[in-house]
Amino acid sequence: MKVKRWLLTSLLGVVIVGAGAVWTAEPDTFVTMIGIVWILCGMVLIVMGMGKMIVSLLTLFLPKGERDLVNILYQKRYLERGPKIVVIGGGHGLSHLIFGLKEYTANITAIVTVADSGGSSGRLREEFNIVAPGDIRNCLVALADAPALMGELFQFRFSQDSQLKGHNFGNLFLTAMVQLTQGDFERAVKETSKVLAIRGKVVPSTVSNVHLAAEYMDGTRTEGEARIPSPHSRIKRVCLTGQEAHPTQDAIDAIEEADVIILGPGSLYTSVIPNLIIPGMSEAIAKSQAFKIYVCNVMTQHGETDNYSASDHVKALMEHSQRDVIDACLINVAEAPPEALSRYKEEASFPVKPDIEGIKEMGYKVVAADLLGVTDYVRHDSQKLNQALIKLIESHRVVRR
């Protein structure tokens, strides 16, 4: 620990200061000057010893590889003074967004949908009668300040040839934590947040064990989030079935205290809207004095938003909530290269048309920018998106002042 050596250094400094103080009392000018020098040297030893001792103690509580005190002070001082941002949605879009925003502010609350019914989350829901943990897990990992290996552990998926095939370790961990907390899913998320030392908060939009159902334009209906995307008919409306849903108090409190509320990005009908149709949620957002932003998707989703323009996305939000749930819309206007779009044509997925005037006619502010990131997928570039959001947030804060 190296604590004792620095404690002794400080004590030695105290002794030297004391001796110097005695010498300064002598009438001899030369002896007095020596005493002053001793006092200065003693003070240097005291400051150095105390400083090094504090660093040694802090090192014990820092994750391996995070020894940079400047970075820690930046997080504690600057980030904690950042705006209170609430992000609402689900899926990978939400986790990618908050991963970048946590470098702008530590006051992030992710309100996450729990209506997922597919994959590992769906199987755990059926077996243990809990709400879906998958999107919660992704957001916890995105906000984690724990070592990178811990994040990789929570995202680890067991192979298909094992008894735990398809299950994700983080989902299993959350499920086990729910059992340890006597079925209290909110407490389970909070305890898991401590394990991952997250920067901000992750809260479920509801802990009611509800399922998502969709009604289509042709009059048919289906239940279960994983089965909703349908290529046969356009979605008319989605709703919740099962238990009577109530928003969590943490979600309502975060919305009431927020400076900024961000909806999306993410699947429109299965990630964003499921949060808004929980009774009381849209009303709370509409009443909030926060600056409310909707981040529109870059690509349409086959079976869910076929042929949707940006204004169609906004209209769907309004039809499922209230007009005042957003103030501004952030949309991409950059064009993806044809070779990147070729694989999407096979999936019947196309770029969302940025019909700016259509949204303005609805009474909302529109910010159009290059938000595109092209790798194996065509999606939002995390850095571009966060820069655009921060610029929009800061400009709004300046105007309000």
Image: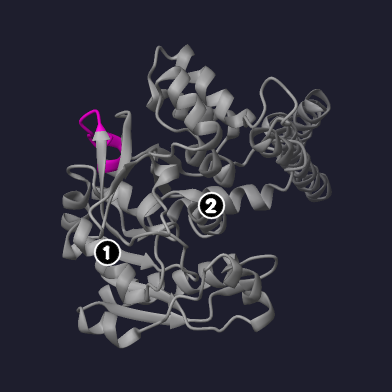
Please identify the quadrant where the C terminus is shown: bottom left
Q: Which residue is mark 2?
A: 92
Q: Amino acid at mark 2?
A: His
**Quarter assignment of residue 222:** top left
Q: Is residue 219 above or below residue 64?
A: below
Residue at figure coordinates x 43%, y 50% from the top left: 108
Residue at figure coordinates x 70%, y 38% from the top left: 152
Looking at marks 1 and 2 on the same chain, the residue that comes earlier in the sequence is marked by 2
Q: Which residue is mark 1?
A: 316
> Residue 109 appears at what percent x and percent y?
40, 46
Residue segment shown in magenta: 242-252
> Residue 62 appears at what percent x and percent y?
69, 35
Q: Amino acid at mark 1?
A: Ala
Q: Is residue 84 above or below residue 157?
A: below
| Any part of residue 87 in sight | no
Q: Is residue 28 left or right of residue 215?
A: right
> Residue 288 appears at what percent x and percent y?
20, 56
